[in-house]
Image (cartoon, rainbow, N blue to C red):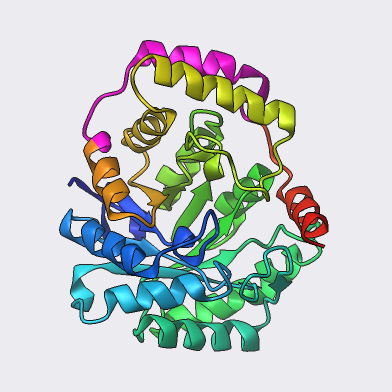
């Protein structure tokens, strides 16, 4: 495993890092024992950065990750979680967004209890674009101030953000006190707009955590989750790209992971898995060069959706209506 300095955070993180969203059943049902084994496999293979959130499965992901990390020396890994977005178990689409000082402080205490720690290396302000941005300014004023206070108190090491829209990322990199940034779905086979952030990241020492190499399921080779906002026609393009990769003897998930993780300008790429076999496979894939000709063909198929800004709010709304 290779390691890189994550901007000005002082953290030397593994090239691949472990995102625990899937531990909460966000993508498919989870066998808890196997999920715990996947975390242990990641540690054994040299992965030293784990990211989670209370919103993933309505605290389930934090609880499972806490069980997996129990008894593991704290100096073997870096840990981040998120604040501001909360979901009841099984209630995807019924999110509560609260960026008040009181709630963020309480959230940190609750996450610490589930994860068995009293310190987080990074805290991300989470998904403040949701619900049609009605809470964005609240998050970027009171929410940011609360995180800076927690950093000053030594409760957290670094202030970060976890959001999706590119206009908000440009604003954050230009005007806000970011130590790190969890940028998801913007350096994949289908979207490379994270490259736009690199000049500011280098100038300000902001460590970019490159999230969602599998495009929130679109590039996994399996059907994307129901909550993803891609239309039926758009999903068909991803199926065509996946079929081409299979014809060439490699799953699209392999090409997706290789492409996302092998750009040296991004210190770490965050993937999620609940299976130890998949963790081992992803680490092995990361070390193999990808086929540039296959990459070009896949991106040609995905041309109609290249750099498309997905409307995740619409996906949540559609999912909620489907459930009801």
Q: Position of residue 84 (x, y in %)?
A: 63, 73
Q: Position of residue 97 (x, y in %)?
A: 71, 72
Is residue 290 magenta-colored? Answer: yes
In this rendered view, identify the residue nearer to me: 213 or 143: 213
Q: Is residue 260 visible?
A: yes
Where the C terminus falls, by quadrant? Answer: bottom right
Q: Is residue 116 left or right of residue 149?
A: left
Q: Main secondary structure of the magenta part?
A: helix
- Residue occupying image coordinates x 27% and y 37%: 286
Is residue 172 magenta-colored? Answer: no
| Quadrant of the rendered image containing residue 43 | bottom left
Q: Position of residue 303 (x, y in %)?
A: 61, 18
Q: Is residue 61 above or below residue 227?
A: below
Q: Is residue 246 above or below residue 212?
A: above
- Residue occupying image coordinates x 39% and y 69%: 32
Q: Is residue 244 left or right of residue 225?
A: left
- Residue occupying image coordinates x 67% and y 20%: 304
Q: Is residue 153 visible?
A: no
Q: Is residue 259 left or right of residue 243?
A: left
Q: Position of residue 279 (x, y in %)?
A: 29, 50
- Residue occupying image coordinates x 33% and y 78%: 67
Count of numbered labels shown in the rendering: 0
Q: Is residue 81 left or right of residue 84?
A: left
Highlighted magenta segment, given as a residue range: 285-307
| Quadrant of the rendered image containing residue 238 | top right
């Amino acid at each position: 495993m290779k390691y890189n300095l994550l901007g000005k955070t002082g953290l030397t993180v593994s090239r691949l890092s472990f995102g625990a969203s899937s531990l909460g059943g966000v993508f498919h049902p989870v066998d808890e024992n196997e999920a715990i084994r996947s975390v242990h496999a990641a540690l054994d293979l040299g992965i030293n950065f784990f990211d989670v959130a209370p919103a993933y499965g309505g605290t389930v992901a934090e609880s499972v990750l806490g069980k997996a990390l129990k008894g593991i020396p704290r100096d073997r890994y870096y840990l981040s979680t998120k604040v501001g977005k909360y979901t009841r178990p099984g209630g995807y689409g019924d999110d509560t967004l609260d960026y008040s000082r009181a709630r963020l402080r309480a959230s940190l205490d609750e996450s610490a209890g589930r994860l068995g720690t009293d310190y987080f290396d990074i805290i991300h302000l989470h998904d403040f674009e949701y619900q049609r941005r009605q809470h964005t300014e609240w998050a970027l004023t009171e929410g940011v101030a609360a995180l800076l206070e927690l950093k000053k108190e030594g409760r957290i090491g670094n202030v970060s953000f976890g959001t999706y829209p590119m206009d908000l990322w440009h604003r954050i990199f230009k005007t806000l006190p970011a130590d790190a940034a969890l940028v998801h779905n913007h350096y994949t086979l289908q979207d490379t707009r994270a490259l736009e952030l690199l000049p500011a990241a280098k100038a300000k020492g902001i460590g970019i955590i490159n999230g969602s190499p599998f495009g929130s399921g679109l590039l996994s080779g399996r059907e994307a989750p129901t909550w993803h906002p891609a239309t039926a026609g758009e999903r068909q393009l991803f199926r065509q790209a996946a079929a081409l990769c299979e014809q060439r003897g490699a799953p699209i998930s392999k090409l997706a992971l290789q492409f996302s993780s092998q750009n040296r300008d991004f210190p770490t790429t965050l993937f999620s898995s609940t299976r130890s076999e998949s963790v081992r496979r992803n680490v092995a894939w990361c070390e193999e060069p990808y086929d540039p000709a296959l990459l070009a063909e896949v991106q040609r198929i995905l041309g109609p959706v290249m750099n498309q800004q997905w409307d995740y709010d619409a996906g949540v709304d559609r999912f909620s209506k489907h459930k009801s």
